[in-house]
Image (cartoon, grey):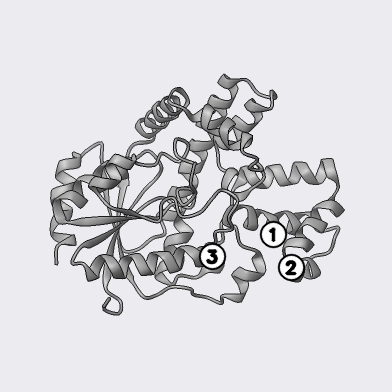
Amino acid sequence: MTRPQETTLALIGPTAVGKTELSLHLAEEVGGEILSVDSRQVYRYLDVGTDKVSPETRKRVLHHAIDVADPDDPFSVADFLALARDAIRRIRARGRIPLLVGGTPFYYRALEGGLLSQSLPSDAQVRSRLEEEARERGREILHGELAALDPEAARRIHPRDVHRTVRALEIFRCSGQTPSWWYAQGKTLGGEFRIRYVGLIRPREELWRRIEERVRFQFSHGYPEEVRWLLDQGYDPRLPSLQGFGYRELTAWCRGTMTLEEALEGDIRATKAFSRRQMTWFRRFTPCVWYDLSERSREDVQQSLREAVIP
């Protein structure tokens, strides 16, 4: 059984910094299994756009919290917590080492029992789209959408208060859970595990280059086809699962309102903006030991972490 407050190692850092490569090598060396802390990788069929490791790699290194919901399934932080707790317990019961890897800050905060009111999910692009909907469809329509999803929140927010209506819907579209659900949880949801954070960083110019290379690789290796297939299956692009960067731009391409090059450049810009938001949150995570991968090799960092994860 898991000992209360047993320390668990987590690899954090902005997207495209190199978390996946390091985690795979480390897991193989120490007998570990990876718990994905990524709010988009939980969805099936979102493979290229979420940069999932291949099925072959998952046979070599076991992964958890990947492909556990369909794109139109509700999936909340509470679902992630239940799944994560169970996975960590089972990994340890088999004598293996759990490694938490991913870039979703509010999942980590919930797992460690942090103040969720300080970690409610947000996304500037989702907010911008909602504000545009309010202008085009009318604030009353948007408030009616909130009333259908979260009657309690709608009662607290005046129909003319566009700002608060947008924020409430933003929370739902980013997390798959309503504001009232979040507030009902109180201060904590987790707290069973004490997390030791290891952060990976690179200079901004280097990270920007890696982001651009990865997005271009995705676009040339099935990303547009993946989004078209999802839409052909009837998945609504307004679903929380499809509100992420890249999926939004490629949906516009599929509908003929954006060229493929515009979608690609839009994805690159959105991914860079997302990486900045990630670092804003991750800088608040303590205690955390940071490694600059432009100064230290992956092998060097791996060697430094080996003793930290082996009891």
Residue at 56%, 77% in the rendered image: 186
Which three-letter amino acid code belongs to the residue tagged 1?
Ala
Instruction: Please identify the quadrant where the C terminus is shown.
Output: bottom left
Taking the view exactly as shown, the residue that stands out farthest to the front is: 233
**Dot 2, how many residues are within 10 Å of its Cα: few (below 14), some (14-19), or many (20+)?**
many
User: Which residue is under mark 1?
Assistant: 168
Q: Position of residue 273 (x, y in %)?
A: 52, 39
Question: Looking at the image, is 152 positioned above or below residue 294?
Answer: below
Left or right side of 60 for 67: right
Cα distance between the residues tagged 3 and 2: 18 Å
Mark 2 element type: helix
Q: Are marks 3 and 2 in contact (CB under 8 Å)?
A: no
Which three-letter amino acid code belongs to the residue tagged 3?
Gln
Q: Which of marks 1 and 3 precedes in the sequence?
A: 3
- Quarter-wise, where is residue 247 in the image? top right
- Quarter-wise, where is residue 252 in the image? top right
Q: Position of residue 159 (x, y in %)?
A: 85, 60
Left or right side of 68 for 139: right
Mark 3 element type: helix
Of tags 3 and 1, the one toward the viewer is: 1
Which residue is more in the foreground, 257 or 226? 226
Which residue is more in the foreground, 200 or 83? 83
Residue at 36%, 48% in the rendered image: 13
Left or right side of 33 for 221: right
Of tags 3 and 2, the one toward the viewer is: 2
Q: Position of residue 184 (x, y in %)?
A: 61, 75
User: Which residue is under mark 2?
Assistant: 153
User: Which residue is under mark 3?
Assistant: 118
